[in-house]
Image (tube, rainbow, N blue to C red):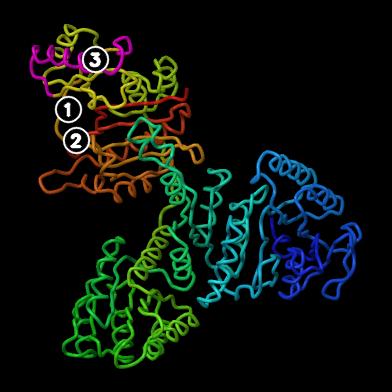
């Protein structure tokens, strides 16, 4: 699709300049210096010569072949040049100039005009407001960035920011690792991050893709494209520009917890994109993914010459969800023969301060031979009796021979410079602190799990009555905030196979007593008023009523408390609900993100849900594997297996509810939010019941 863009037979630089301060000069210079082997042409109405080549007055006079036009002229002149490209049969263009939609309505109109011309002539455009791209292996440098460019490597970098590209190139050279490709995306008038991901994955010189992102054009399409790419090659991304301003405007716990950051987390997770929080983390992880084999599991050994760094690594392993490997007795016996008598033979293995090249190499080899060890963290502060470089020279051959990942925590600065150079020349990732090495190991474990995960599709669910659910939505009374009364909400859930306790809606205390007698005591009373966000906060819930008199008093209490909050005419009635046996209370819900679509939430419920923040989100529809991950990454989910005096709850019933909520969110796009708080998971085999439900519809 984009082969002729990345590997053009000929390039024309429109706006090539003899003035070294102009971007058109920088682009021409970089193409020449990069030793691009295709046909290279310069275009400027002023004519002349540049780098011993003629400057043509226009594109029409440029000889064949030309696959790519690099347009380095003011924004206002770009539409005319795109027309020339179309007439000339040029199918790819890079527009470097700013002054388009990022500057306001006039620039937006100019960008739309450019897009119309490009579509009419079937021209694919990178930019505008970008610095271009480079490929260190072809080679071609179609940017105007200062020289020297990056050294050849196996990490591709895609960026929405040109300035970040420039900084990354300089930083990468200083760190001693290279790039395969670099693409500046700019405004993404046409070609976007998904297009470039799909193109880069086919590059044989790229092992890992790193991305700096400020947004995505089309959320579902990005997830699809990125998901296909991550099955072939790992993608690590930073996403910036997140805003929480909208959180204050939502009325449900689910909505308040689902900021834009949560939506991107869920989208990246569904696509298999590994999310980094800062640049150092992104490139550190990319190095590990490019240079290391993947571990078989999460059991990691730590080799160190001091107790403190080993303890830091052990804590980091627990924080990152990895495990200290249990060394076999055979391994410990071998270490006892190889290391000083005072060395600690438990994991972390502390060889003491006198450990030198031999001890490090022997210790590492012994750990790697243990079948219970999936990977090793080697911690190397500046050793007092030798040099870090000598230790590096001893362990590099050991690392080269293993099929297990080894991360080096090379602590220090001036005393470890030579050792760092040796490791990088050997494509062995090194980090300045143990925590960084451990986090990189965790990313390798994540990558292995992603590749091993089954390629599921959402299951077919029986007992769903879509048309009936739509009828209840159409008839529902909608409050000023968009929420519907709880009776309509529960009817929708029931038609999706989600169980609700036995209940009756009443309008008088006498009816409440009659309903309680019918349902059987004890009962709960709950106000039905769409515009009361959290009923318990306003005295709208009374629980565990055992007699008619208690029901009457509870009913009067609810009316007295809630009419102080909303007018009595907005109260639809009171729900009498059969009390449910004890179980584990959790929160589940749906909230719709305007970019990625519906998100399903799971976590610890109750009135303190926002303070606990023990929740996770996943994009609907859900697979069994995705639901299992939701349960395993939260305390609420792990607790379902039983904890202390809590018996195991019906975990399968909770999984079923989450799958059905995900399907509801896909089937009913007019549903903006659903919250079940709590969903009570009864003892194993007894199911789960939605005790309180809120639903908001699109107004």
The residue pinned by badge 2 equals: 682
Find out whether the residues at labels 1 and 2 contact each other: C-beta distance under 8 Å: yes
Label of residue 580 in the image: 1
Residue at 59 percent of width and 61 percent of height: 163
Q: Left or right? Give the position of 259 relative to 9.
A: left
Image quadrant in which the N terminus is located: bottom right
Dot 3: few (<14), some (14–19), or many (≥20) neighbours within 10 Å? Answer: many
Q: Quadrant of residue 326?
A: bottom left
Q: What stretch is highlighted in magenta?
A: 544-571
Left or right, 543 with respect to 614, comes to left
Location of mark 3 (residue): 574
Between 284 and 148, the one lying in front of the other is: 148
Q: Do the residues labelled 3 and 2 touch (CB within 8 Å)?
A: no
How far across and down, in percent of the image, does residue 674 sit? 37, 30
Q: Was residue 369 drawn as part of the magenta stretch in this picture?
A: no
Where 256 sits versus 391, above or below?
above
> Would you say the residues marked 1 and 3 are in contact, meaning their CB atoms lie under 8 Å apart?
no
Q: Does the magenta-highlighted stretch encompass residue 556?
A: yes
| Front of the two marks 3 and 2 | 3
**Left or right of residue 551, residue 256 in this image:** right
Nearest the viewer among 105 and 281 is: 105
């Amino acid at each position: 699709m984009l082969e002729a863009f990345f590997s053009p037979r000929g390039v024309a630089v429109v706006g090539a300049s003899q003035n070294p301060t102009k971007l058109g000069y920088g682009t021409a210079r970089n193409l020449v210096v990069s030793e691009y082997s295709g046909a290279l042409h310069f275009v400027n109405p002023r004519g002349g010569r540049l780098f011993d080549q003629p400057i043509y007055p226009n594109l029409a006079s440029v000889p064949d072949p030309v696959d790519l036009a690099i347009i380095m002229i003011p924004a206002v002149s770009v539409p005319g040049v795109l027309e020339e490209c179309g007439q000339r049969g040029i199918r790819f263009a890079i527009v470097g100039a700013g002054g388009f939609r990022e500057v306001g309505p006039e620039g937006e109109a100019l960008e739309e005009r450019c897009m119309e011309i490009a579509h009419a002539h079937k021209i694919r455009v990178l930019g505008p407001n970008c610095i271009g791209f480079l490929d260190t292996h072809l080679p071609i440098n179609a940017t105007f960035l200062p020289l020297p460019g990056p050294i050849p490597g196996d990490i591709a970098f895609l960026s929405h920011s040109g300035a970040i590209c420039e900084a990354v190139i300089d930083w990468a050279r200083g760190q001693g690792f290279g790039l395969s490709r670099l693409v500046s995306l700019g405004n993404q008038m046409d070609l976007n991050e998904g297009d470039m991901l799909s193109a880069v994955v086919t590059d044989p010189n790229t092992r890992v893709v790193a991305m700096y992102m400020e947004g995505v054009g089309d959320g579902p399409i990005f997830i699809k494209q990125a998901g296909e790419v991550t099955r072939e090659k790992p993608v690590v991304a930073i996403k910036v520009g997140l805003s929480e301003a909208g959180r204050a405007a939502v009325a449900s716990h689910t909505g308040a917890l689902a900021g834009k950051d949560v939506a991107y987390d869920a989208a990246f997770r569904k696509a298999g994109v590994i999310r980094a929080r800062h640049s150092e983390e992104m490139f550190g992880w990319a190095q590990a993914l490019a240079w290391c084999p993947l571990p078989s599991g999460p059991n990691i050994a730590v080799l160190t010459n001091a107790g403190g760094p080993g303890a830091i690594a052990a804590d980091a392993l627990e924080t990152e969800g990895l495990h200290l490997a249990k060394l076999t007795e055979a391994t410990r016996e071998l270490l006892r023969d190889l290391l000083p008598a005072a060395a600690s033979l438990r994991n972390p293995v502390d060889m003491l301060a006198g450990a030198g090249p031999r001890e490090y190499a022997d210790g590492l080899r012994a750990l790697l031979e243990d079948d219970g060890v999936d990977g090793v963290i080697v911690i190397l502060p500046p050793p007092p009796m030798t040099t870090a470089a000598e230790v590096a020279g001893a362990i590099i051959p050991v690392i080269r021979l293993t099929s297990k990942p080894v991360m080096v925590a090379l602590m220090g600065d001036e005393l470890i410079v030579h050792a760092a150079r040796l490791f990088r020349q050997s494509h062995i990732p090194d980090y300045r602190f143990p925590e960084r090495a451990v986090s990189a190991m965790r990313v390798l474990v994540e990558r292995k799990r992603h590749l091993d995960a089954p390629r599921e599709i959402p299951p077919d669910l029986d007992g769903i009555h879509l048309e009936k659910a739509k009828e209840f939505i159409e008839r529902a009374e909608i409050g000023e905030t968009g929420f519907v009364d709880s009776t309509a909400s529960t009817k929708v859930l029931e038609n999706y196979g989600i169980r609700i306790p036995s209940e009756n809606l009443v309008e008088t205390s006498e009816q409440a007593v009659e309903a309680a007698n019918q349902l059987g005591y004890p009962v709960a009373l709950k106000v039905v008023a769409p515009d009361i966000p959290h009923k318990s906060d306003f005295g709208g819930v009374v629980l565990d009523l055992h007699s008619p008199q208690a029901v009457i008093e509870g009913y009067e209490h609810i009316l007295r408390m809630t009419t102080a909050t909303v007018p009595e005419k907005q109260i639809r009635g009171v729900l009498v609900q059969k009390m449910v046996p004890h179980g584990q209370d959790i929160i589940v819900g749906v909230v719709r993100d305007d970019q990625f679509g519906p998100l399903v939430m799971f976590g610890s419920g109750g009135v303190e849900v926002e303070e606990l923040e023990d929740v996770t989100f996943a994009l609907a529809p859900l697979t069994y594997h995705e639901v299992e991950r939701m349960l395993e990454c939260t305390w609420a989910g792990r607790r379902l297996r039983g904890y202390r005096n809590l018996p195991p709850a019906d975990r399968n019933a909770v999984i079923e509810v989450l799958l059905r909520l995900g399907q509801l969110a896909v089937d009913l796009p007019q549903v903006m939010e659903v919250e079940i708080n709590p969903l009570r998971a009864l003892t194993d085999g007894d199911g789960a019941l939605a005790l309180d439900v809120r639903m908001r519809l699109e107004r």
